[in-house]
Amino acid sequence: MATQEIKKQSPKVYIDRPDHLSGGHRLCAGCGAPVILRQVLMGAGDSPVVISNATGCVEVSTTIYPYTAWKDSYIHSAFENAAATISGVEAALISLKKQGKVTEDFKLLSVAGDGGSYDIGLQAISGALERYHDIVILCYDNGAYMNTGFQRSAATPKGAWTTTSPVGKVRPGKNQQRKNLTEIAIAHNIPYVAQASPHNFRDLIYKAEKAFAAKGPAFLNVLSPCPRGWRSKESDSIQLAEAMVKSNYWPLFEVENGVYKINYDPKKRKGAVADWMKQQGRFRHLFTPENEWIVEETQEMTDYQWERLKAMEEATARFGTQEAAEAQEPAE
Amino acid sequence: MTHKDKTTKEMKWDISGIKNWGPGDHELGSIIPEAGNARYYHTGGWRTEFPIRDEETCTQCLFCYFFCPDSSVLAENQKVTDFDYDHCKGCGICAKECPADAITMHPESELAERVKK
Amino acid sequence: MAQTEVKTLAITGNGAVSLAMKQVDPDVVAAYPITPQTDVVQNFSQYVANGDVKAEFVTVESEHSAMSACIGSAGAGARTMTATSSAGYALMVEVCFVAASMRLPIIMTTVNRALSGPINIHCDHSDSMLGRDSGWLQIYNEDGQEAYDATVMSFPIAEHKDVRLPLMNMYDGFIISGAIGPLKPLSAEQVQQFIGQAPDYPKLLDAKNPVTMGPFDGLHGWYFEQKIAQNIAMENALDVIQDTYDRFYELTGRRYEHLMKYRMDDAEIVVVVANSAAGTARAVVDKLRNEGIKAGLIKLRTFRPFPVKLYAEALADVKVVGVMDRADSFGAPGGPLYMEVLTSLYQEGQCAKAVNFIYGLGGRDVFPQNIEDVYRRLDAIAKGEDAPRERIYVNAKGM
């Protein structure tokens, strides 16, 4: 199906799709990652999937030997190489299909957290996107190395407490603003890039479906609440994701053949970054007279990024012709 | 809340004696040959609170199905029917996100009695 | 038996190996270019560009991704090859351990080159010796013909049900990789017939039987047993390798063994050496034999698994053995090969005198005179001179 024909469906349509993940995995109660995985894999529909997974929370919790929560084929080899591993699976799929040794169609998904995507796995992701494999690369971004006990990553928000950006007498948590990985993916000129959140499941499933349908590589960056690392209540995970989206800190948008589209504009319902920061213990130290500037600065940065995103949507609206998309595709 | 003895009998890959498996007993390369067999591992024991859904208040918006981290909201014919208490960890997301307030959380100690009813 | 009228080609070591890869025509090659392996990747790219091979070629952005893609490909059920050298091998070592533990029969050519630093592009064996504990089968080759033959023989060995381990073939950078030598190739049909179809094993691309590969073993703990299983496979490989060598002899008349003995029948002083220096050593042995000195040579082929018993047997009646290592293990009793040979002797209760010679690091030349000096030293020790315990550096400056 051409990606343009894919529309958001009602929950009744999506609930009929198979659940590709079983219960009995050992991710923390209230973790956002399995919610994301279930929704993303609903985007694959009935198709069998091969999942390549980086070392991390999802990996260690879903495949505790001798149990696996994956109903599809799954491979994990190391932390930094999920995208390279799925590249090899794709090459094998092409080769074996050509020879008639494999007859089924498979969707190919690479899964890594922000550590395995923004940091140690960035090179492998960039290489895979440039080589134009027909794969989907998913980042579940919980904003730190949660699996090993909350160390900072390039996705950690400024001012956040982590165990390697601790709060001390002279430092108020992480010093730097986060990296914009979604924009880095966009710069690879691939057919489809999207940012999403599990609280808007129709939007995420729709984006995953588009990503799987795209001819070539697609990248999904999805906000993944982490009660343990965010120091938040287990039951608040989905509500927190929604609050972060409503503050425009994590805008929902997609870029199809270079054309930006904002999928959700909170307008009058717009919230402030302080709304969700106050609910997360990792930002508790920021609500003091000496540290409040970090909250203000994050708000300014967020507003600036949002304005820039809107400008990109306006500026790119006239591009994205079929010819431009085809020119980007590799030769046979 | 674990029913391991009952469910392990359905396993395609018999791991009942795995505690004592030697080098030659495993699949080569530690492959797990049965997809989704984590369902035989019960995480229900993690709960301190369990969810209950009020059938009459429920509008069947299905949000709880899509938000459950543990695939523990059961559905049939496009309708939510029950919870899978073998795997539900009691995070409470379903109750928090329910727009109709049809789901409520209750102390785990009351579960046995409530499920009987 | 030996084939009729095989045309002999004049071809570089890298040319010979890329020809073997073309004739094998695996399902997938994922590789990254590095000196001195570069021609292998370039040649294979040309085969792909010419439509001479069916293989999917993944032009990865690093060696780490090369091995990772190989893991994905082999895990998916495809016959998979790669090639590397030196720093590139070092970069992929993390995932080489993973490939072995996942029991994926990936075939890799490793053109031996020194590890940095200082950065040096020339031959020594420090790269492949870095991976001696990675769980890969390791075969060392003297020249282009051996490397070609070894590439063809790799598949029945690595894919054998009792082995199922990845395999790496070594030959010396520049000395062999870039130098033109004679090659008697097989026909593509002979190669295909010899390697046969890859056996079926659980794979990712089986929608009816999905599998999980590379699970987490941190809680219940069967890591230990999985490691023991890897060692059992290594032990099984000894027979499988020799059987494959024997089958290859039937086809080509070229005889291979785990260790290749030269004038060993009544030898009293013996050198053990790997790869291209063996050719020089044979000429030296001939010269010494003409003088009446009972010199012999053992050329190492199979390093993993290490054929302990065969070394002990071959050295049973030898007075002094000199082990020549083209890699060092800093702070260890000696180079890696020396330690393995010593252990083999000890395990069989033998106590021939043994001396370690470190040579050729970073491509330092090893001339016939250097090897003759080695034998003269062994001869002196055989006649009563003390055997030094410390390493002897061959052709090092200012020593």
Image (cartoon, coloured by chain):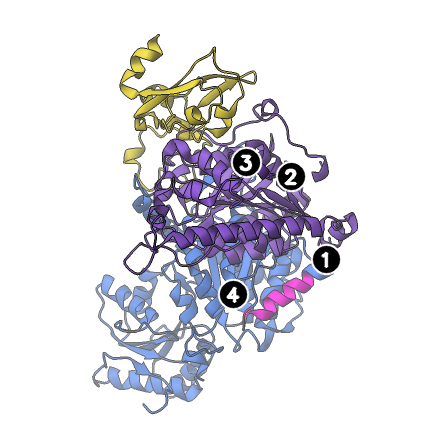
**What distance separates the C-alpha of mark 1 from that of mark 2?**
33 Å
Residue C261 is inside the magenta segment: no
Q: Nearer the viewer, residue A51 or B10?
A: A51
Q: Nearer the viewer, residue B8 or C25?
A: B8
Chain identifier, colour blue: C
Q: Quadrant of residue C394?
A: bottom left
Q: Secondary structure at mark 3?
A: helix
Magenta part of the chain: C34-47
Q: Residue furthest bottom?
A: C398
Contact (CB < 8 A) between labels 4 and 1?
Answer: no
Q: Colour of chain B?
A: yellow
Q: Residue furthest right?
A: A323
Chain identifier, colour purple: A
- Mark 3 highlights which residue? A269
Question: Which three-letter amino acid code belongs to the residue tagged 3?
Answer: Arg
Question: Which three-letter amino acid code belongs to the residue tagged 1?
Answer: Gly
Same subunit: marks 1 and 2:
no
Q: Earlier in the sequence, mark 4 or mark 1?
A: 1
User: Which mark identifies residue A210?
Assistant: 2
**What distance separates the C-alpha of mark 4 from that of mark 2?**
38 Å
User: Which mark identifies residue C84?
Assistant: 4
**What distance separates the C-alpha of mark 2 from that of mark 3?**
28 Å
Q: Nearer the viewer, mark 2 or mark 3?
A: 3
- Mark 1 highlights which residue? C51
Q: Residue furthest front?
A: A289
